[in-house]
Structures are given as structure tokens and as C-alpha cells.
Image (cartoon, helix red, strand yellow):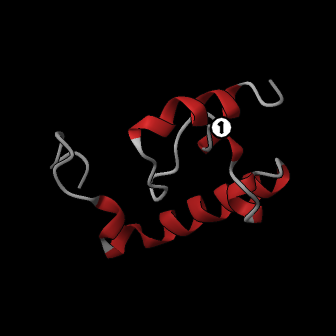
Amino acid sequence: MVKKDPFQLNNLAGLGEYQKVMAIFRKQLKESMKAHDDSRYTNENVLFDTYKYALPSATPIAPKDLEKWYYSNMYPGK
């Protein structure tokens, strides 16, 4: 199938003939994530996807308060 689709227009992972390969890859990924205490595996906070200076998308903030919010998060205690 790969040779028939050199531009990768079809998702091979969804084909039945690749289910064994996908199961092997899933198992390897799970074992690797567990061995490295990957927070995506342990369901802990994913800190590399969180930035202290980024406003959470669900948090409304008035433009007049943005500068205060920025400095209080970037330079706490000052």
C-alpha cells in the first residue's frame, strides 16, 4: 500500500492490514512514556504545554487589567 500511495494521501493506520503494526507501536510508545515518567502518560500536569505568561484561553480579562496581570505573573512579588 505504501508503494501505491507515495504521496501519503491515505491514512494507513486506519487500514486493517496495519493493525498489528499499530498495536506494536502503541505498546512501544506506552512503555517509553512510562519509562521516562512522561507526564502525558501519568496524567500529571503537562508543564511544557503551560506558560506562566500566557493567559488561559477561558480567562476573560479587560484590556486595562492586562498589563497588571502580565507583570504580576512574570515578576511575582515585585
Percent position of residue 4, x then y: 15, 49
Q: Quadrant of the N terminus?
A: bottom left
Q: Secondary structure at mark 1?
A: loop
* Residue occupying image coordinates x 26% and y 49%: 2
Residue with the most extreme bottom position = 16
- Seen in the picture, residue 6 relative to 60 is either above or below; the reply is above
Please count the marks in the image: 1
Q: Quadrant of the C terminus?
A: top right
Mark 1: amino acid? Lys
- Seen in the picture, residue 73 relative to 45 is either above or below; the reply is above
Residue 12 vs residue 64: left or right? left
Within 10 angstroms of label 1, few (less than 14), some, or many (20 or more) residues?
Answer: few
Residue 30 vs residue 17: left or right? right
Residue with the mark numbered 1: 52
> Residue 70 versus residue 47: which sits nearer the camera?
70
Residue with the most extreme front position = 64
* Residue occupying image coordinates x 80% and y 58%: 34
Which picture quadrant has residue 74? top right
* Residue occupying image coordinates x 66% and y 65%: 27
* Residue occupying image coordinates x 62% and y 37%: 51
> Residue 45 versus residue 66: which sits nearer the camera?
66
Which picture quadrant has residue 41? bottom right
Percent position of residue 36, x then y: 82, 47
Residue 19 vs residue 36: left or right? left
- Seen in the picture, residue 22 relative to 35 is either above or below; the reply is below
